[in-house]
Amino acid sequence: MKALVTGATGFIGSHLCEELVRRGYEVTCLVRKTSSLKWIESLNLNLVHGDCNDRDSLAPAVTGVDYIFHLAGLTKATSRDDFFCANTEGTGNLIRAASEKNPGLKRFLFVSSLAAAGPCKAGPIREDSVPSPVSDYGMSKLEGEKAVLAFRDSIPVTIVRPPAVYGPRDRDMLVLFKMIKKGIFFDLGKCYYSMLYVDDLVRGIIVCAEDKKTEGKVYFLSHSKVVTGEEIVKEICSALDVKAVPLKVPKFVMPFFAFLGEKMNKQGIINRDRIKDFRHSHWICDAEKVQREIGFTPQVGLKEGIKWTADWYRIHRWL
């Protein structure tokens, strides 16, 4: 089997490439000339230089592959236009090229986000819930979903929506680990989250791509256990063998912290758009559909996933 992976140099994409190669796939990665290949340079891969926003570069990448795994996009930006350019227009360009140049494609799988559905209002979000994204990022991913579904009559497509994903190489969760190691963390009040360890997500992505029953559908991929912010902090403290003191952060001052965060790091997790998500306390999805229809069940719980992530951070001197 031949697969194209976009976003292959990133956190999730690099793990996906590793697993696809391990399973015997011939993997091609669409990468920019400026992309760091650090996490995939040791793998037996084919590289095609291009960009989802450069339509002329896409034909060589999509031609002749059996599966396309589209992970490329922006998760952090200071401009609404940047989000829509990467997550909506880029997705539309790629699937249009696939439809035109590879009509025999077995599956186009788009990795979206729980942010496209939005936070909970009355119980866990399900696939048939009306999407209500609250951030520019979430809105751009939802529009990306619509771009994909517009082609489901011409090529087989599947969309997966993971919640918060963590594991080795993740720099977003690293921010919290570093704070806790210093003995503090921001207390946002009682918050509830769905989460998923990166290895489980990768396995779910591949299962959804390979199963005929998932064609034309949208799925949440998540661990069934809902966790609180307190539980996440507790497990990180345990993994690092430290104690941490909470710093209460009223929601009305969050935009100020976001402004400061952007000044320090424009591509960091603390920014004005991400704060729109943080101001909501319930980010919970119901992943029963994917378990019922194709039998996918995550295997890694929070305690072991946090421990493995902490161990990796320490080994690679990120902590």
Image (cartoon, rainbow, N blue to C red):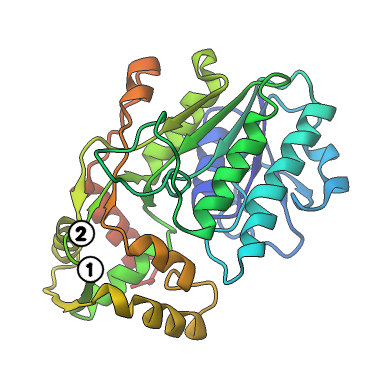
* Figure check: 213 above or below 271: above
| Mark before the other along the chain sequence, 2 or 1 | 1
The residue under the point 84% across, 28% down is 100
Other residues around mark 1 within 10 Å, as few (<14) / some (14–19) / many (≥20): some
Q: Quadrant of the C terminus?
A: bottom left
- State how many labels appear: 2
Q: Tell me the quarter of the picture where residue 250 sits.
A: bottom left
Question: In the rendering, at what x and y percent does residue 124 appear?
Answer: 28, 38
Q: Nearer the viewer, mark 2 or mark 1?
A: 1
Q: Residues within 10 Å of mark 2 (few under 14, many from 20)?
A: some
Residue 236 visible at all = yes
What residue sits right under mark 2 in the picture? 229
Extreme-right residue of the structure: 56
Q: Amino acid at mark 1?
A: Leu
Residue in the foreground of this view, choosing between 279 and 267: 279
Q: Secondary structure at mark 1?
A: loop
Q: Is residue 36 visible?
A: no
For the residues labelled 2 and 1, the Cα–Cα distance comes to 8 Å
Q: Residue at x 34, y 63 (%)?
A: 278
Residue 61 located left or right of residue 206: right
Q: Which residue occupies the foreground of this view, 55 or 116?
A: 116
What residue sits 30% from the left and 25% below the top?
A: 288
Q: Residue 31, relative to residue 253: is it above or below?
A: above
Q: Could you tell me residue 101's position as x and y percent?
A: 84, 29
At label 2, the amino acid type is Gly
Residue under circle 1? 188
Q: Which corner quadrant of the image does residue 215 belong to? A: top right
Where's residue 26, x and y in %?
A: 67, 31
Q: Are marks 2 and 1 in contact (CB under 8 Å)?
A: yes
